[in-house]
Structure formats: structure tokens, C-alpha cells
Image: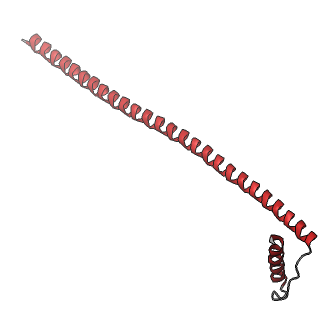
Amino acid sequence: MTAQANHRLTTNIQRRIYGHATDAEIRPLNEERAVQVAGDLIGELFVFTVAGAVVVFEVQRSARSEAKKEEIRKREIEVMRQRDEDLAKEVELLKQKINEVEKLTKESALARVLNLKGSQTQAVK
């Protein structure tokens, strides 16, 4: 029965493709030919089912692999972001130290200038 339905369907499709009349009567297959067509149909269905399952499996495997890669990239970006923050803090600390050194240097230079003027003033007296 399934082979007969498949025969009618494929015959109608072929007729449409080739531009023949589709309202013509389609003769049923003989029993031997029907069994052969049914076996072919079952075989093709099996092959396509297995192929479809392989495709689904491969897509899922690929998706898992990409998800792992994305997770690794996110971790690497987070490590870089943390390193950037640490470096920014270190730069800020170094700027503060430079400012302190400059301030001390200016104070020291000012003290030397004042000492020099004070020495000259005492020498004049």
C-alpha cells in the first residue's frame, strides 16, 4: 500500500516536472515491483535518518566546541581587563610618588636658596 502511494506521488511529480498531464490514470505496480519499491523507500528513509542524525550530532558538537572557545575567550578578556586595572592603579601610584619627589625636591631647593641668602646676609653684617 505504501509503495503504491509512493508510486503515485513520484509519478505525479515527474509528470509535473516534464509538463505532462497529471490527471491521467496511474496504473498500480505489480506485487513484486511494489515490494522492491517499498524496500528501496525503507532503505532511503534509513539512510536519510542516519544522515540527519549525524548532521544534528555534528551541529551540537560544533556548538559545544564553540561555547568552550567562547568561555576561554571571556576568561582571557577578564584576565586582561584585571591586568589593565592593576596597571592603571600602579601608574596612579607612580604618579603620586613622582609628585611627592617633585614636592620634596622643590622644598629642598627652596631651603638651599633660603640658606644661601641667609648666609650672604650674615656675611654682610
Q: Residue at x 68, y 53 (%)?
A: 56
Q: Residue at x 24, y 21 (%)?
A: 104
**Lateral position of residue 4 relative to residue 77, left or right:** right
107 to 29, vertically: above or below:
above
Give me the residue at 46% from left, 38% from top: 78
**Splitting the image into 4 quarters, where does residue 42 fall?**
bottom right
Tell me which corner region of the image, top left, top right, bottom left or bottom right, holds residue 8. Answer: bottom right
Count of picture labels:
0
* Residue 68: percent from left, percent from top: 58, 41
How did the renderer colour the structure? secondary structure
Q: Which residue is nearer to you in this view: 32 or 15? A: 32
- Looking at the image, residue 106 sits to the left or right of residue 18; the answer is left
Q: Give the camera-side residue of 79 and 1.
A: 1
Give whichever of 102, 76 is nearer the camera.
76
Q: Position of residue 98 (x, y in %)?
A: 31, 26
In the displayed structure, would residue 103 be above or below residue 1?
above
Left or right, 116 with respect to 86, comes to left
User: Residue at 64% across / 49% down in the picture?
Assistant: 60
The location of residue 72, given as percent across then percent down, is 55, 38
Q: Is residue 54 left or right of residue 10?
A: left
